[in-house]
Each structure stands twice: as C-alpha cells, then as structure tokens.
Image (cartoon, rainbow, N blue to C red):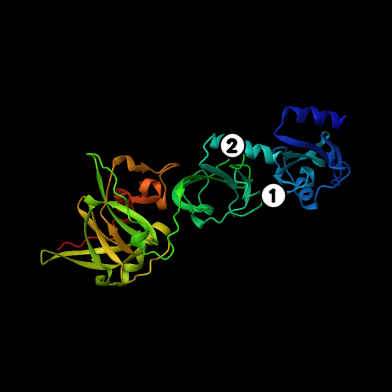
Amino acid sequence: QLNDLLVYINSLYTVYTRLFVYDSAGRIVACSHPDAGESTVLGTQVDPATLYRVKAMRSEQDYCVTPFAPSVLYGGRPTYVYHAAVRNPSNPAQVVGGIGIVFDAEPEFRAMLQSALATQPSMGALFLDRQGRVISSSDPTRPVGSVLPIDRTLTELPAGESLSRIVVHDGQYAVMGCTASCGYREFKVTDGYKEDVLAIVFDTLGAVRDTRGAGKKVETVLWPQPVGRAGLEYATFFIDGALFAVPAQHVLEAVSASKIRAVSAGERGGRIGLLGLQREGAEAGIVWVFDLQYHLRGVPARMGRGSQVIIVRHEDKEIGLLVDELHGVPEFDSGQVMSMPYGQDGERGLVKHFIKANDGLVLIQAIDVRALFSSLVTRDTALAVEA
C-alpha cells in the first residue's frame, strides 16, 4: 500500500525522481521506482548521520537536506535528498521513521540553465556552491563536481545580490554576471536551512589575441573608426594589465607618481599620500592620491617607473588616481559605449560601462566618475587642500 501511495504522489511531483519511507532503524521499507540499476533500494539503509537528524526533529515543519553529493538513491549521481520525520499518530512526539524525497537534479537544473540562456550561442551558465564547485553547467568542459576558480568577491556575495564585470574566460573576453540565491518563501530564509547557490552567466564578446612578447602599448593599439558628431573622448590607462578609461572632461592632468609624498594617514581606505600640484608655474594646492587598483580589485598596486597619477575633477573636488601607465586620449562613437549588463556592480561598483574597441577585440572598462567620488570622497577623508 505504501509503494502504491508513493508512486501516485511521485506522479504528481515529477521534479522528484524517487520518494521513499524508512523505519526507525533507517531501513527503507517502501519506495516509488524501487529499482536502482541491477538492484533495489528497498531494504537499504539511510546513513546514520541523516537518521540522527530526522529523529531529533521537533515539529512537523522541520526537515533536513543532504549535501549535494553522489547518492545511491539517484543512481550514483549527485543530488539533494530531503528528509522529514514520520510520527506516531497516537503520540506525535514519537518518531517512528522518516520519508525522503530525491530531487531529479540533473535534468531540472539543466532545464533552468537552458531556459535562462534561450538560444544565445555566445552565452554559458553555471550553478555553483560558494566553494566554486559546479552543481550544473551548460558547458560540457565543466562537468558537475568540477571546480570553477572564483574570487572572494563572488564567494562572499550577499544572498539576493548581483554583480557583473568584464573578465577573460576560456581565452575570450566576456561579461560575467553573478547572482547569489535568496531563498524561496520561507525556505532557506527562516527555516534554518542554508545552502546558497551562485548563478553565473558568461556572455563572450571576442577572442583574446595572443600578444606575448609585445609591450602594453603595442598590444592595445586602437584602430581608427568613424566617429559621429556625438564622439566621446576618454583618457585611457592601465591597471594590473587591463585597460580602463575615464571621461576626458574630468581629467585635468597626469603627474609622475614619484612626486607622491607619503603621509602616516595615507594608508586608510587606499590613500597612499599627497601630491602637490603646479599649474602655469605656480602652486595649485595638494590632493590626496588613491590607489585605483586597490579600489577596483582589493589588491594594492606596485609602483614602478611608469606609474602615473591622474588628477580627476568632479564638481568642486579633485583627487589623484595612481595608475600603472598612461595609454592615450582616444575618441569613440557613442555606439561603442555600452552599459554593463546583469546589474551595475562591475569592479566593485565603479565600472558602469564598457567600450568595445577594435571591433570588440579590445574591451575598455569605463570608470563612473560620480560613483568614484561617491566611494572615495567622504566627510572624514579631507581630500582636497586648497592652495
């Protein structure tokens, strides 16, 4: 009778591949779809750790979930198995066994990813846990159980939040979007179960050219392209080998980083010192200099011979930005400047747009000046000291 009942229930909930009931010793006594290859799951045992958790459940609302791992109940493939207690109708405090539900992870997760990607051939998607282990993937080269290296910005992304950035992925420039799961109704929210999933999408934009042996300026020579009346000028520069840009109207000048004067307060918030300004042969005040790489990547820059400080102005404030090397002041057509998709949190919230140069072979991340000053200019930084 239990077998028939479980088969009927399972036919109504097809996202589960198997339902099973076990006694107080953890022995499976009834099951839908009992066959497991050449054997049967009937008579097999629930693992002791899970059985202990089920027996300790206090109410009918309690449940537990096994880690995403290979399971005999799922033909040796990885999945989640949900468990709840079965209680004595005459004495609800007495747990007489348990019921388990096996999620049909492989096709269900795959269907979610394919639905998100639709028919976009340039896009790929994955579900990961916070350690970077693959739960499901549209990429056959990254099977379930493999690990995708991800940085702490993603592993520590708060539940329900998203970010995007430009990355190099499998030899391709790509826009990456990531969202951390935030639960469903009360599940994974107020029920005590925490098992976050990261959803990551890569949208490839073009192959990375092999430029080994070439200098930075050689490998990023920008091709001349027709520019309309609404041409946009950007000051471009290098940070950690990547090309970034700031709207040229905000850039006043560039000064050698060797002129930075270190001060004891300069370590706070990525500030590395003060820089005295001179314009038309006269002193023009001093500004705080910020390590832009630190604010973009969380890693301090190494100052070298080519390091420069770009003086940037927004409204009535000026700051200095330490960069690795200057590149140029190219002009782009407005159609080449694109908003960052998948939210507005690229490179710690400072990159809101990217520029597709050289027919998409070179991607330039554009710093949003308003966001930059909002992040760096606070009441306690005392940034600009008037001349």
Q: Residue at x 55, y 36 (%)?
A: 116
The C terminus lies in quadrant: bottom left
Q: Residues within 10 Å of mark 2 (few under 14, many from 20)?
A: some
- Give the camera-side residue of 312 and 241: 241
Instruction: Please give the label number shown on residue 222.
Output: none
**Residue beneath label 1, please?**
67
The N terminus lies in quadrant: top right
Residue 62 sits in quarter: top right
* Element carrying mark 1: loop
Image location of residue 308, percent across then percent down? 28, 65
- Give the camera-side residue of 185 and 362: 362
- Give the camera-side residue of 192 and 1: 1
Q: In the rendered structure, which disc, 2 or 1, sits on the residue that comes first in sequence?
A: 1
Image location of residue 332, percent across then percent down? 28, 46
> Marks 2/1: CA distance?
24 Å
**Going by the image, does 144 lie left or right of 283?**
right
Q: Amino acid at mark 2?
A: Gln
Q: Residue at x 31, y 58 (%)?
A: 237
**Going by the image, does 146 lie left or right of 288?**
right
Total numbered labels: 2
* Element carrying mark 2: helix
- Give the camera-side residue of 308 and 169: 169
**Residue beneath label 2, please?**
114
Image location of residue 34, percent across then percent down? 84, 37
**Going by the image, does 197 lie left or right of 60?**
left
Image location of residue 165, percent across then percent down? 44, 49
Q: Amino acid at mark 1?
A: Pro
Q: Residues within 10 Å of mark 1 (few under 14, many from 20)?
A: few
